[in-house]
Amino acid sequence: MKQYSNNLIICLLLVTWTGCAYFNTFYNARQYFADAEEKRLEKVGESVPKNALDAYAKVIERSQKVLDKYPDSKFRYEAILLMGISHFHRGEIRKAEITFLNLEEEPGGNYLLEAKFWQALCKWKLGKVQPAINELEALQQDVEDPKFQARILLARADIFLEEGLNKEAFGTLEQAAVFTRDPMERSQIYYQIASLAYRNSDYDLAYRANKQVLKSTISKSRINEANLNIVQIRREQGKRRIVESLVKSLLADDQYKDIHGALELELGKMYQDNDALPETIEQMSKIVQNYSKTNQSAEALFILGEIQLLTFHQLDSAKIIFEKSVSEHGNSPVKQKAQAYIKKISAYLSEYELLKQNLEGLYNPVEAVIDTSGIDSARQLSSVFVDTIKLTADIARSLYVLGELEAFHFNQLDSAEKYFEEIINYYRDNEYHPKAFFTLSYLKYTLFDTIRAVELEDSILANYPESDYADYIHVLRGDTLESNIQAQLLTDSETNWHLNRPLALQQYKQIIISDSTSEISARAAYFLAYHYDYTDNNADSALAYYTWLDQHHPLSDQNLAARRRFQQLRSILAPPKSAISEPTVIDTTGSNDN
């Protein structure tokens, strides 16, 4: 009897120990999952931090142990769900998809709707965008819980945002705000609303949404970001005193020390926006000194370099400052722009030296000892004559390159005009002579000197009637007999792209200036956006043409193809002040234009 009692006690202990073991294993999985979620949400909007990824890995390990050792556990379904979510946030989308499919097929489980929800998100991440949207919309009809409704709406909004469907995203986010009561979810909703509103220059809505973010979030990084966004918004609205007051109060609080450098930079940009040059220089110099080796100091150096280049036209000092900006921080958002300026300044200085050498060679007396024999004498004279022609062409080329850089990259229109006029007046009989006429006429149009612009065009028609420039002028003036001028212009621009890039760019731009409604103008805008984006590495110009395309042809094939890249650029760059109505820059070199 005693032996029986002992055996019974042992059996009871084994059962109890086994139950405690699988409970403890799953409890650990839950704890790691909660820890991972907290760390992920702390950095919401950024990449998942490594400590969160490690915690998700432990969730997967513990959950798998529950399934392997205790397959009949009551925690089975939840363990599968936690594994799938952990795989998803670790970026292991295929594994996540398989896990949620297994969860859906589990008999007697209560997680069918959760499985369908996460399967839809997996489809999205695997590039099946429309099926994901459709499944989420269908799932919403089957869900009654307000919290779950809000989660579905937020997921749909994320997809719309990634696809650049801002209007749809706005509507979905507004619906989600009605359903959700969770502070973190509300914070995410208002953060997205604020981001959308800012991109659309709706600064009042962006300001209110950021204030709501501050009320609902517990994320330190999100609090800092919302405060910085509010300062940026007030700067965009031109509220100088408010910006100064906000920056002063935030700088006085160590709680916001992580964004102190960014706040100082916003203050400097506000001075720059108000054309307060001494204050701008002083503030940017202060940032360079106090926030060394940061993104902020790199951008401050970049702004100081632009001031030296575009305001004072001090190329050597500007180049030195841009080089410092490049080396200041490896991931600076202005690094590529600074490198582009360095390249252009170097090209300018090199071309200027070459011009001086060629001018000296052309205008200094030729010291040649003429041989008395007729043949040798003729050969020497012929060599001098050929060299003179080549020098003249080289000088014209250098003058044109310098003028083009001054006009379209350094904002020095007076200097540019002098270079082009020099070619027109003194260096004929080369390809840069009509080119100088054409480019100078464009500059005169942008400066509203229509009389001089027309005179230059007339000179092209008189002296170079068979040139592409003359053809373009005829089209521009309506002299062509073609019934479809836009189509003819597009054909010409496509033909000229490999023959005369400056002319082709001008033609593409003229298409969208003269007609914003035709399909041809959509094709032209998309070409220009793509060119500046991927060939010229000029993100600002690319964004301007993507914006024009989105505003004038939102449903066109070109805009649908460009939406994702358009969205990416808008998240990186400040939105343009307004849509393109008449581009003010012709790129005539095909060089980087940042």
Image (cartoon, grey):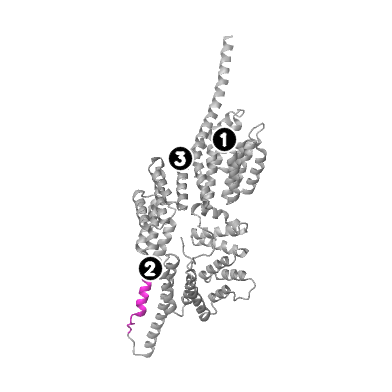
Q: In the drawing, what numbered circle is on residue 220?
A: 3
Q: Quadrant of residue 18?
A: top right
* First in residue order: circle 1 vs circle 2: 1
User: Which segment did they paint magenta?
Assistant: 352-368
Is residue 363 rendered magenta in the image?
Answer: yes
Q: Residues within 10 Å of mark 2 (few under 14, many from 20)?
A: few
The answer to whether any part of residue 356 appears in the image is yes
Query: What's the CA distance linking mark 1 and mark 2?
Result: 63 Å
Q: Position of residue 76 (x, y in %)?
A: 60, 31
Q: Nearer the viewer, mark 3 or mark 2?
A: 3
* First in residue order: circle 3 vs circle 2: 3
Specify the amino acid type for callout 2: Ser
Residue placed most toward the observer, 6 or 522 = 522
Question: Is the N terminus in the top left, top right, bottom left or bottom right quadrant?
Answer: top right
Q: Position of residue 46 (x, y in %)?
A: 49, 45
Q: Quadrant of residue 121?
A: top right
Q: Secondary structure at mark 3?
A: helix
Specify the amino acid type for callout 1: Leu
Q: Which is the main secondary structure of the residues drawn in magenta?
A: helix
Residue placed most toward the observer, 368 or 9 = 368
In the picture of the structure, the residue carrying the numbered disc 1 is 82
Query: What's the CA distance linking mark 1 and mark 3?
Result: 26 Å
Up-down relation of residue 58 to residue 345 (above or below): above
Q: In the drawing, what numbered circle is on residue 350?
A: 2
Up-down relation of residue 465 to residue 193 (above or below): below
